[in-house]
Image: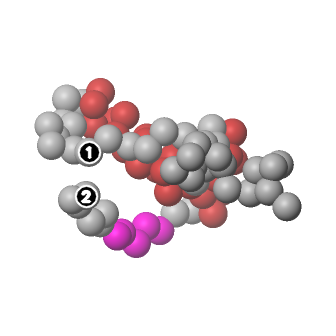
Amino acid sequence: MPRERKKLLLRLDPAVHDALARWAGDELRSTNAQIEFLLRKALQEAGRMPRDAGRMRRPGRPARNETDDGDVPGGEDEE
């Protein structure tokens, strides 16, 4: 069972937030995912990444769900 993700209120300078949002968009991540990506990178570089930290989801849109027969819902064959 996946662990519940922690919620955190973060106050940022508006210019810093805008720069993060643009960077996140360039890498197909949400601003939140970009912040987590950068924090994880900093933890790894400092040798402080916890061994039990879960993996991040890959950037970009999640794959669309397939039906049991392998068809993608809403595909061109559906009317």
Task: Say which label, 2 or 1, has the lower sequence index.
Answer: 2
| Residue positioned 38% across, 43% down in the render | 56
- Span colored in magenta: 7-11
> Can you see residue 16?
no
- Left or right relative to 72: residue 9: left
Neighbor class of circle 2 (other Cα within 10 Å; few <14, some 14-19, many 20+) is few
Quadrant location of the C terminus in the rendered image: bottom right
| Residue positioned 56% across, 52% down in the render | 67
| Residue positioned 43% across, 44% down in the render | 57
Dots 2, 1 in contact, CB < 8 A: yes
Please name the residue that numbered disc 2 is placed on.
Answer: 2
Q: Nearer the viewer, residue 66 or 8?
A: 66
Q: Nearer the viewer, residue 71 or 62?
A: 71
Type of the residue with mark 1: Gly
- Left or right relative to 34: residue 42: left
> Can you see residue 42?
yes
How many numbered marks does the figure carry?
Answer: 2
| Residue positioned 37% across, 34% down in the render | 41
Residue at the left extreme, as displayed = 51
> Residue 1: x percent and y percent?
21, 59
Say which element carries label 1.
loop
> Residue 48: x percent and y percent?
18, 36
Residue 54 is tagged as 1
Residue at the front extreme, as displayed = 69
